[in-house]
Amino acid sequence: MRGSPSREDQPAASQASGREVAFLDKAKGAINAFNCEAGSAISASIISASGRRIEVELTLRGADRSCCLNDYFDDLSLKLERNIGSPVAAFDSRPAPKRRDAFLVKYAILDFLDELQKPIAEARDMVAERMEEFAAARRDEGKLFSELCFCILTANFTAEGGIRIQDAIGESFSRMDCATLSKTLRQMHHRFPNKRAEYIVGAQALCGVLSSELSRFTTGKGARRFLADSVMGLGYKESSHFLRNIGYTDVAIIDRHILRYLEKKALIEPGKALTRRRYLAYERILEAIADRLGITLAELDLYIWYMETGKVLK
């Protein structure tokens, strides 16, 4: 019957349930140890646990939030990690509703990292080659703008389709008017020829000065904020995509492939709108994964793409 679990599904469901129960039991032990050591300064309690996520409420009892809060978050991470026996990372925090003295903190349990060793071994050379191509692109002003246009094109489209159009137009993006570009994109079967042409023509003011504009920022995250706020058609995902494709390694491209991967690992709740705040929280999960594996966020993205698609595309 449709919707009924098969026998094949039941062991996996039982395994997930058993894993969650084990995580919760060990997390409770970590919380108890944390509370004993913190004394009267702060107390912690588990609000919820699902998949590989644990949400904790931390209540301040005289602790100085201005200098100590992140230390407490990290201290609890370490205690959770010791008890659970797997890497744990705090990835989201916010004030508790209607409470001035409490914060809600979400922790991710990263007990699956060994699974990534196989794709890393298989695709290491391809990823290294791709990273060299990205770094080289930053040294060519014409290619910089072409790459910006590629990332505008791929929003709600496909990477393969964006590559095909970019290869055909090349550096002519900087010289085409809106009507001509819209007609060209329509002929090349882009889903949104008019709007993407409008965005690209609007961005032409950056052609020739992208390098100097980006050089004002010491990190990819700073450059991303500038791009997302000043270039129509670029959100955090597209801005991160552009920056990764020109050699930045400290931003994550959270597209549907990455979201699907995080959902499969029960690290995020499915179906949530990808707000800027949620984007940054998910990026912190990916940063923790990359850090544990000794790779960059840019490389991690390519390895997950390889796992999901069998390809190492830009």
Image (cartoon, rainbow, N blue to C red):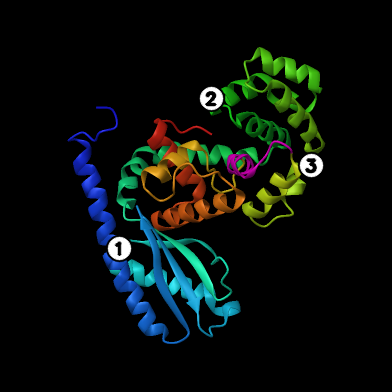
- Reply above or below: 134 against 81: above
Q: Which quarter of the figure has residue 180?
A: top right
Are the two marked residues, 2 and 3, in contact with CB atoms closer than 8 angstroms? no
Quadrant in which the C terminus appears: top right
- Tell me the kind of residue under disc 3: Val
User: Which element type, helix, strand or loop, lies under badge 1?
Assistant: helix
**Residue drawn 23% across and 43% down?**
12
Assess disc 3: are there few (<14), some (14-19) or many (≥20) residues with their C-alpha within 10 Å of its C-alpha.
few
Assess disc 2: are there few (<14), some (14-19) or many (≥20) residues with their C-alpha within 10 Å of its C-alpha.
few
Q: Which quarter of the figure has residue 222?
A: bottom right
Q: Which mark is residue 24?
A: 1
Are the two marked residues, 1 and 3, in contact with CB atoms closer than 8 angstroms? no
Q: Is residue 149 visible?
A: yes
- Reply above or below: 90 against 192: below
- Tell me the kind of residue under disc 1: Leu
In this picture, which residue range is highlighted in magenta? 232-245
Q: Which mark is residue 209?
A: 3
User: Which element type, helix, strand or loop, lies under badge 2?
Assistant: helix
**Residue drawn 29% across and 69% down?**
83
